[in-house]
Image (cartoon, helix red, strand yellow):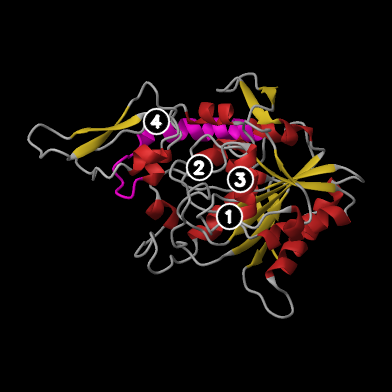
Amino acid sequence: MSSKVFFHDARSSAKKNRLDKVRSLFKHAGFGRLINSRDKVAVKIHWGEPGNVGFLAPPYIRAVVGLVKDAGGLPFVTDTNTLYSGMRRNAVENLRAAAINGFTAETIGAPLVVADGLLGRDFRRVDLPGSSVGEARIASAIIEADAMIVCSHVKGHMLFGYGGALKNLGMGCAVPAGKQVLHSDVHPCVDPKVCQGDAICVTRCPERCIEMVPRNASRPRGKKVALIDQERCIGCGECTSACPHQAIPINWRTSTEAIQRKTSEYAYAAVRDKPGRVGYLNFIIQVTPDCDCCDWNDTPFVPDVGFAASLDPVALDAASIDLVAKTPPSPLSKATGCIGDPWRAVYDVDYRRILAFAEETGLGTSDYELVRL
């Protein structure tokens, strides 16, 4: 049986602006019915790494917060601490990063809560018998919320190919120790023929497990290449995304399938105790090649597509993927000149695997009915 996905395109006018369309989706998808009076409602977002300007703008989240209040809920806007280096590895700097990007209690109308506490160690274990992870470590504020609205920025990703509701749930609700479990099959290594020796990866590695070593004996002194200590590497992928020369590829065949399967299991764990209490909004705008965790953002590779909402995260992501795939690529972007699927032009990754894995866990169905509003 198919799930309904409600959709508004990105066009706007004096009669209906983009925020009006978000409010319309909230209503048509029935999100108000998910919330009881005085429910503590998590509004799960990604407020972006400072330096990146492709993340969801605060006015969108303020609109969602207002709708949760109208439904009688007590909203709080939340995200978790990160595994990789940057400003979001602890709650103090994480909230500073949110404020730098415009997310404060005053701008969004609700308190900000780092869901896994000061150091990312505040979590609840969710047993997952028969899964590949065995158990999931989900941020406590996610588990303890009565209901949740998941607001996801649709974009590309080097490991998933696509990032939307499922990744926001699975990776975004995991504590750092859980994120490390999810990344444990990722094994980046440096291609010495491509490495330019600029040591950008060294500065970005959270574990300091990359060093510069002589390229070979025949090279002039000072010409070095990066080398990753595989024993100390935690598989966060930070070096791969940071290298501007694409000198640190990932063993795609072994890593992407495992991380997508485990992320779908974590996504299920994040909402298992909230049947009928979670709504999903996908913002298919500023569709950049990389995650908002990067402290930069490349040119969007398709024009703004629109906004979609559903009670089924699998159907929602399937529809979002298809809507982008049918959109001509943007000029001067990473997908310029693409004939066919723009997702695969950006990263040659089988991004549909996570949909199949999520269906196996019982999160939803990729069979959807698109309802254009």
Q: Which residue is mark 1?
A: 320
Query: Do tag 2 and tag 4 residues touch (Cβ < 8 Å)?
Result: no
x and y percent of residue 98 in the render? Answer: 63, 50
Q: Marks 2 and 1: in contact by CB < 8 Å? A: no
Q: Say few, some or many: other residues with alpha carbon within 10 Å of mark 2 (under 14 / 14 to 19 / 20 or more).
A: many
> According to the image, label 2 marks what residue?
86
Q: Earlier in the sequence, mark 3 or mark 2?
A: 2
Q: Is any atom of residue 192 visible in this view?
A: no
Q: CA distance from mark 1 to mark 3?
A: 11 Å
291 to 269, vertically: above or below: below
How far is disc 2 from disc 4 in space, using C-alphas? 13 Å
Q: Which residue is mark 3?
A: 366
The residue carrying pointer 3 sits among few (fewer than 14), some (14 to 19) or many (20 or more) residues within 10 Å by Cα, namely many
Percent across and percent down for residue 225 are 23, 37
Looking at marks 1 and 2 on the same chain, the residue that comes earlier in the sequence is marked by 2
| Cα–Cα span, label 1 and label 2 | 29 Å
Location of mark 4 (residue):
208
**Which quadrant of the figure contains the N terminus?**
top right
Task: Say which of marks 3 and 2 sits in front.
Answer: 2
Q: Nearer the viewer, mark 4 or mark 1?
A: 4
